[in-house]
């Protein structure tokens, strides 16, 4: 009998494949995205030292107060805008996008597009 692999295991395996091809440096750090059933998370990470430089998520009170729901496309777009603004404040203009094994569609795409519109380059 064939065992069906869970979706989360498939996503983690895809993420490992993606991470083999990209890494954040101090010149252009990595914009890592994670999406759960209820929230969106984004971090800008310098992999050469292993530090998170900037982060934003729908769990934060300031972000959650602006949103009606925390798990839809509008929430993802707002997180993208917030992460881009915070990155530009810290002097980060160029990043490498890490979709975290998720399909580049819907919420992930909305976050990326909003970050680009707010001034991040990737």
Image (tube, helix red, strand yellow):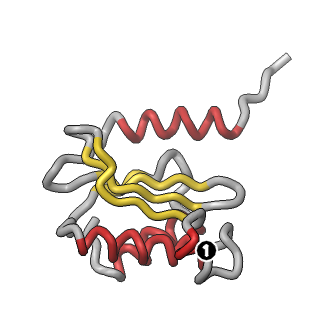
Direction left: furthest residue: 27
Towards the viewer: 99 or 62: 62
38 lies above or below 115: above
Q: Residue at x 62, y 35 (%)?
A: 10
Determine which residue is flagged by label 1: 64
- The x, y position of residue 45, in whole percent, is 31, 49
Direction front: furthest residue: 61
- The x, y position of residue 81, in whole percent, is 42, 77
Q: Is residue 117 left or right of residue 95?
A: right
- The x, y position of residue 67, in whole percent, is 63, 80
Q: Is residue 21 left or right of residue 9?
A: left
Towards the viewer: 1 or 5: 5
Q: Quadrant of the N terminus?
A: top right
Q: Residue at x 45, y 64 (%)?
A: 56
100 lies above or below 108: above
Q: Quadrant of the C terminus?
A: bottom left
Any part of residue 23 in sight: no
Indicate the secondary structure of the residue bearing disc 1. helix
Q: Residue at x 26, y 60 (%)?
A: 95
Picture quadrant of residue 19: top left
Q: Is residue 6 left or right of residue 105?
A: right
Direction top: furthest residue: 1
């Amino acid at each position: 009998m064939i065992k069906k692999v869970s979706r989360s295991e498939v996503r983690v395996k895809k993420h490992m494949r993606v991470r083999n091809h990209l890494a954040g440096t101090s010149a252009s750090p990595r914009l890592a995205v994670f999406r759960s059933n209820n929230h969106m998370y984004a971090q800008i990470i310098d992999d050469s030292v292993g530090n998170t430089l900037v982060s934003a998520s729908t769990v934060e009170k300031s972000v959650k107060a602006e949103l009606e729901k925390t798990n839809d496309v509008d929430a993802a777009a707002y997180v993208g805008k917030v992460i881009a603004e915070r990155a530009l404040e810290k002097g980060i203009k160029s990043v490498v996008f890490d979709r975290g094994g998720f399909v580049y569609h819907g919420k992930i795409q909305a976050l990326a597009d909003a970050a680009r519109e707010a001034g991040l380059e990737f």
